[in-house]
Amino acid sequence: MQSEATDGEAAGWFFENALDAFVVVSHGKVVSANPAWFALSGWSQAETLGRPYAELHHPDEAQHIADQVMRLRRDGSSIFDHRIPAPDGDWLWVRTRAKRAFDGRALLVIQDISTERQAAENNEKVGRVAELLGETAGVYVWRFDPDAREYDLNPLVTGRPDGSGLLRVGEAAFKDLIHPDDRGEVEALWARVRGAGEPAIVTYRHKAETGEWRRFRTAWRGVRPLPSGGWDVLGITQDFTELAGARDAALAAVQAKTEFLANISHEIRTPMNGVMGVLHILKSEPLSDAAQVLVDEALACGSTLSQLLGDIIDFSRIEGGGLQLTAEPLDLSREGDVVIGMLRADADARGLALTINAPESLGWASLDPVRLRQMLFNLAGNAVKFTLKGGVRIILATSGEGAAQRLRIEVSDTGVGIPMEAQANLLDRFQQADGSSTRRFGGSGLGLAVTKALAELMGGGIGFTSLEGAGSTFWIDIAAPACAAPAPVRADPWLTGLRVLVVEDNPTNRMVALRMLTELGADVEIARDGSEGVEQASAGAYDIIFMDIQMPVMDGVEAALRIRALPGPTGQTPIVATTANVLPEQIESYRRAGMDGYVAKPISPAALLAEISRLAAAMAPEQAA
C-alpha cells in the first residue's frame, strides 16, 4: 500500500510539474489538466474541466480529430498535429501524443510546435523561391561540405519535413561536368576558396543532362572555417545560356550592321565620287555664268548628300564604339576659317552676316581636326539654315592651361529659334524642332545627335539656349590640351613631274583621278584592277600609288601586300588607299597591308593634295637622313 501511495505521489508530482501540457479525457470530456496546459492555452480550470474535448480544436479539423479518436480506440495510441485556441484569441499549432488507459480514459501529452511549424513554413517559402529562381531565371544557390566533399545543390529547402528538394553531388562528379577548356581556371579559383575561403566569380561551360553545354556564371565564398582545415563554402550560380545567346546575336547584328554600312557606303560613295569629281573638273572648264552657277549648285548639293551619308555612318560607328579620334596639333585661331569658307557662299546668298571671333592668342591644341570641324560645321550650318535675316556669329575661347585646357565654341544666330516644347529632345537622334511634312527647313535630325556624341567622346558636352522667334545660341565645351606648334612643312612645288600610278576599276573614277592629278602636274598611269597594279608597279618606278580597295580579279589589300613583297625601292613605294570604306577597323587593315594612308571617296583635289603633302612631310626626315 505504501508503495502504491508513493507511486501515486510521484505521478501526481510529475503531472503537476511537467513542462509539457497533460490533459485527461473521459467519455469525451476533459476531466483533468496540469498547470502547463493552463499556461499554454490561457484557459482557467473552470473553462477547461468538464469541457467537451472537441472544443479544444479548430472547427476545420473536426474530421481530422474524429479520425485520430478512431485510431486511438483501435490501436491504443495516436500522434497528430492540430490547432488549439491561443490566449491571444488566435490559434496555436500543437502536437498531441494520445494513449488509451486501461480504464478507457485518454491521456494526452500536448507540445507547442508553433515555432517549429513557422520555421517549416518559412523554409517552404524559401524553397519555393529557390525553385522559382531556378525555373525562371536559372539561378541556383548551393553549399559545399568539405568534409563530405559534396555539393548540396539546394540548401534552401533542407528544412522540409519530407526532405524533398535535396540534391547532393560528389565533388569529382561535378567537376567532370565542366568543359575541359574551362576546367583549369575553375579548379585554380576553387583551390583558393577551399584553402582560404577566398571569394571568386567565374564563367564556364557546364554539361547538362541533355548533353548540351550550358553557360554558367558562379560566385562563391567561404562562410566559415572548419576544424578539419577546410572551409564551408556557399555559392550562387546563374545559367545565362539564353542571355549569352541573345548577347551573341546582338553582337552579330552589330557586326552585320557594320558590314552593311561599309558596303552601302562603298556603293553610294563610288558613284558619288564620280559625280563630284566630274563637277570639280567641269568647274575648271570655261563656262558661261549661268553654267557656273549650276555647277556650284550641284557641288553644294553633292556636299550636302556627302555630309548626310557621313552623319549616318558616324552615328552608327559612335553607337557601336567604333569611332576613334586622331588628335594632332591645331591652330585654334584658324579652325573656324575653314568652316566659314564652306558656309560663306550660302550666307551671302541669304544676305546674312557671318562673323567669327577667334584671336591668335588661342594658340595650338591637340585635337582631331576632322571631328572638330564636323561639330563646328554642324552647328554653324544649322545656324545659317535656320536664320532668315540678321546673321550668325562664332566665338572660340579657351580656359585652363596645359593638359587641362578646354575649348568652348559658341554659335549664335538671329534665326527662328526653337519652340519650348521641342527643346527637351532636340539633341536626340532624328529629332527636329519642326517634324511636320510642311516644315520649311530640311535635314535628317542627325547632325546635333552626332555633334553631341562627338563632344562627349572628346571629354565635354553640348548645350543651347533659345527663344522662339529671337534666335539661338549653341555651345560646345571640350577638352583641348595645349601643345606646341609643329615644325613648318616645306611647300615646294614638287608635284610637277611626280610619277603616280592610279589603280581603279571604275571608269568614271579613273577619268576623274587622271584629270585631277594631271592638272596638278603629276605624270599619271592607270591600272584597271589590283593584278594590273602589281604588274605595273613591279615594272615602273612610281613616286606614289593610289589604290582602290574593292576591285575584281584582285582587291586593293592583296595588291598592296604583293607590292610590299617586291624587292628594292619598288616595294617601298608609298601606297594610299582611295576608298569609301573608312571605318576604323578597315583603315587598320589597310595599314597592316602596308598602305601609308587613305583618301575617302568622294575625292576632291584638296584631299589628294593634303595626303600627298602629309606623306612628303613624313618622308622628308628619312630622305635627309
Image (cartoon, grey):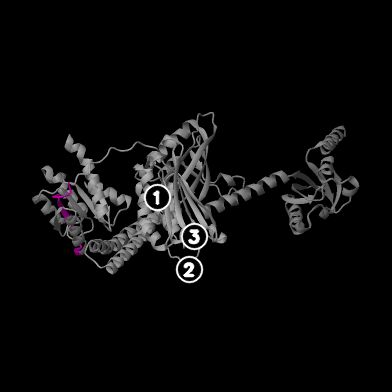
Residue at the farthest bottom position:
438
Residue pushed farthest right?
A: 46
Closest to the observer, 135 or 344: 344
Q: Is residue 94 left or right of residue 356?
A: right
Give the mark toward the camera: 1 or 3.
3
Mark 2 or 1: the one toward you: 2
Residue 497 is covered by the magenta coloring? yes
Q: Which residue is mark 3?
A: 415
Which sits earlier in the primary sequence, circle 2 or circle 1? Answer: 1
Q: Amino acid at mark 3?
A: Gly
Q: Residue at x 39, y 41 (%)?
A: 360
Q: CA distance from mark 3 to mark 2?
A: 15 Å
SS class, disc 2 = loop
Whether the magenta-drawn stretch holds residue 400 is answered as no
Tell whether label 1 touches label 2 (CB within 8 Å).
no
Q: Quadrant of residue 256?
A: bottom left
